[in-house]
Image (tube, coloured by chain):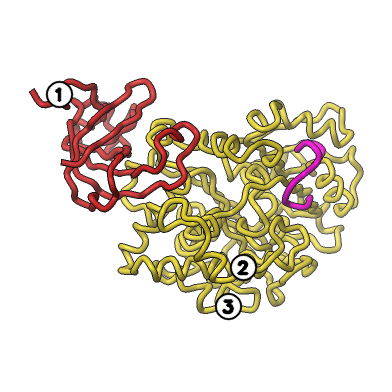
Chain colours: A red, B yellow
Amino acid sequence: MDESNKIQLPRCYSCNSCGYRSSAYKAVCPICRSTDMVALEGAKGGIVVDFVQVSIPPENLKDLGEYVSVLVKLDNGCQIFGIILEDPKNIKIGTSVVVSSFNNDTKEVFFKTL
Amino acid sequence: MGGRVAIIGVGMANSGKSTVPSWELFAGAALKAIKEAEIDLSEIQALHLGNVYSAFTEAQTNMAPLALSAMGIDTNIPSIRYETACASSSVAFRQGYLSILSGMYDIVLVGGTERLRAVPGSFVQQAMASSMDIAERNVGLTFAAYWAYVAKAYARKHHMSDSKLQELLAKISIKNHFHGAFNKKAHLQKEATMEDVMSSTMVAPPIKIMDCCPFSDGAAALVLSREEIAKRRKSPVWIAGSGQASCMFRIADRTDLSTNPAITAAAADAYKQAGVGPKDINVSELHDCVNIHEVICLENAGLFKEGEGIYSAEEGLTYFDGDMPVSLSGGLKSRGHPVGATGAYQLCEITQQLRGDFEGKRAKDPEVGLTVNVGGTGAVVTVHILRREG
């Protein structure tokens, strides 16, 4: 079994009517106004849409030192932000990544490149 | 209902570091505005106050009646505190305006106050992060990182190299510091050079410290009145348009980070109410919390076409003597960013520009002015249009 199968995965939401996807809860679809919004199965990975190197971490992440913030389009169609603790030179738009850890309480998501 | 509403008095504290609590700071600004309005304290019928972080930075909530009490008003008038992140005081202004427009009140006091510099900067950053989506801030999306994403998206869309982007953004900071150097109420009253900006500490590439505004203490107040009262004053400034809109809260769900449709929507409402268009604007104060956001405001409010706002400072167009003077106060970069008061500062400054008594760089005989005040990562936007003549 792949290592990423063992961890919890970030939740996403989908509109059963028009297919709209969001990483945030929506009572009503903002596109078609359908109330048929369902939680999607978590995705194990996706591709990097964009990334930013953060040189000065916020207080809650100061133990990390410098890190890379990534915007990832998950395989289930949702986009979420996460963290990669790798050399930014190895990360490009389109790089494939997998979830390496997810904390369901804090929603902290860490990815690693493939 | 109906009639027009005017600004008949303004007052601002110095932006920077305050030695007194935010409610005392506001009382000082409010009394200046009331004196200028030539009214008695007893004529104020309501207070609409913007404030964001006093619960974090001063361990104080219930700010609106406290501010009234600090002014010496302990009578039975309503007071309300508004919290919409950095747009709080322009929302307070808007609600005060609407309350007069509704016919309920004749004279109201509006404004904002904030004290951020009495606590460590890291504490303020944590407080400010609370204005973002909790899930996104927990995964390291800082404000600087957000603006870095915006800047990168803008550069990609307009086929601009990273070095050119940084150079053009620096020129916006330099422009705002130039204006702020002449504003005696500004937090950072000094000019900046290209070297100052380009050599400053990188926070989240391409965003450097000198691309960002400082956290400031400050308070600003305005007295608003209905038309019949305003007409008896020497230089009323009329509220011609007031737009407000919201943007998708979660940033990951936005499809194009180089634009903010809420600015466009709020501006469209304000222009329609005022019966003017972007070409009629003679002076503006925009929300340059980070210099790339001045570009987004310029373009989404229609003052420049998409892809052209980035060149505005380089070409001199947004300087006090340019075709589209922007942020002659120094903007958030130089006047400072007392978060819950910033929108009120902008409205006071445009009022003074239109009256011709702003103490700093002035636009040439402006008749119509505009403000764009944005809360959080673009989630709340107000656009106001003020005009000198009826």
Identity, as a three-letter code, of the amino acid under mark 1? Asn
Identity, as a three-letter code, of the amino acid under mark 3? Asp
- Rendering coords of residue B142 (x, y %): 45, 42
Residue A5 circle label? 1
Residue at image coords 30%, 69%: B159
Identity, as a three-letter code, of the amino acid under mark 2? Ala
The stretch drawn in magenta includes residue A18: no
- Rendering coords of residue A89 (x, y %): 26, 53
Residue that carries the numbered disc 3 in the rendered image: B323
Q: Is residue B248 left or right of residue B287?
A: left
Residue at image coords 61%, 41%: B121
Depth-wise, is mark 2 or mark 3 nearer the camera?
Answer: 2
Above/below status of B262 relative to A104: below
Task: Check if mark 1 and mark 3 are on a common chain.
Answer: no
Q: Is residue B183 left or right of residue B250?
A: right
- What residue range appears in magenta? B13-24
- Rendering coords of residue A87 (x, y %): 28, 47
Residue B192 circle label? 2
Where disc 1 sits, the SS reads: helix
